[in-house]
Image: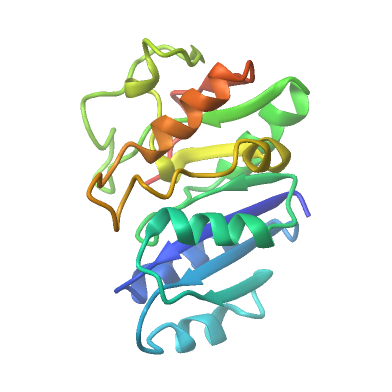
Amino acid sequence: MRFSLIVATRGRSGEVGAFLDSLASQGRADAEAIVVDQNEDDRLAPVIACHAGRVPLVRHRSDRANACHARNLGLSLARGAIVGFPDDDCVYPPGVLARVDAAFAADPALRVLTGPAASPEGGLGSGRWRRDGGPITPANAWTSVIEFNLFLRRETALALGGFDERLGPGTPFGSAEGNDLVLRAVAAGHKALYDPELRVV
């Protein structure tokens, strides 16, 4: 398995289906989705049933409403050499996984790859993204990282201990968990790159 895409979800169903549709449209049999379901009800059952034959798919239930806890659960189940953490309301445009695959294949030293958020209406989702690609450093991490467009080699994500579960949705600190993970990777000496053309909606 080349990719494991870990979706932490709560309170959504149709959006999860839209992501799975976009994953199926990547045309890759080597990309699995791991849906960590934090819902108290069974709203995702029809979505999972609809997509089970279209993409390699695992659904794991969690009774803890904490996005990073769910991501770490998914990471523990992942089989792919590269892991990503798409939100439950994002979409992968055509060719995203091919671009990520090519970047990691071309550079064995690469451990972390990120890109900006794209808006469904076109263009970037906010004005904070840096225009030039290149290495991620403590000085530019805040204009280079968002969780749903973050890819790591699985061994690196595991060695870093995954996401800090004291950060992100479901905690008093509702964000910055992706920046924290990437900054810990950089501090450990891992190569991390930002690609402004790698866009996730």
Q: Is residue 88 left or right of residue 110?
A: left
Above or below: residue 37 compared with residue 91: below
Point out the image quarter for the N terminus.
bottom right
Res. 182 visible in picture: yes
The residue nearer to you, when weighing 178 against 133, is 178
Query: In screen coordinates, is 22 left or right of 159?
Result: left
Residue at 62% over, 35% down: 99
Is the residue 60 above or below the residue 80 in the image?
A: below
Residue 53 percent coordinates (x, y): 67, 80
Residue 80's x, y, as percent? 73, 52
Residue drawn 57% across the image and 61% down it: 73
Q: Name the colour scheme.
A: rainbow
Instruction: Specify whether residue 25 is in view.
Output: no
Figure check: 59 above or below 90: below
The residue positioned 42% from the left and 31% from the top of the image is 180
* Quarter of the rendering containing residue 76: bottom right
Q: Horizontal placement of 174 versus 71: left or right?
A: left
The foreground one among 133 and 178 is: 178
Q: Nearer the viewer, residue 180 or 97?
A: 180
Residue 172's spot in the image, x, y percent?
Answer: 22, 49
Residue at 64% x, 74% y is: 54
> How many badges with numbers are in the image?
0
Give the image location of residue 31, x and y in percent. 68, 57
Q: Is residue 64 above or below residue 191?
A: below
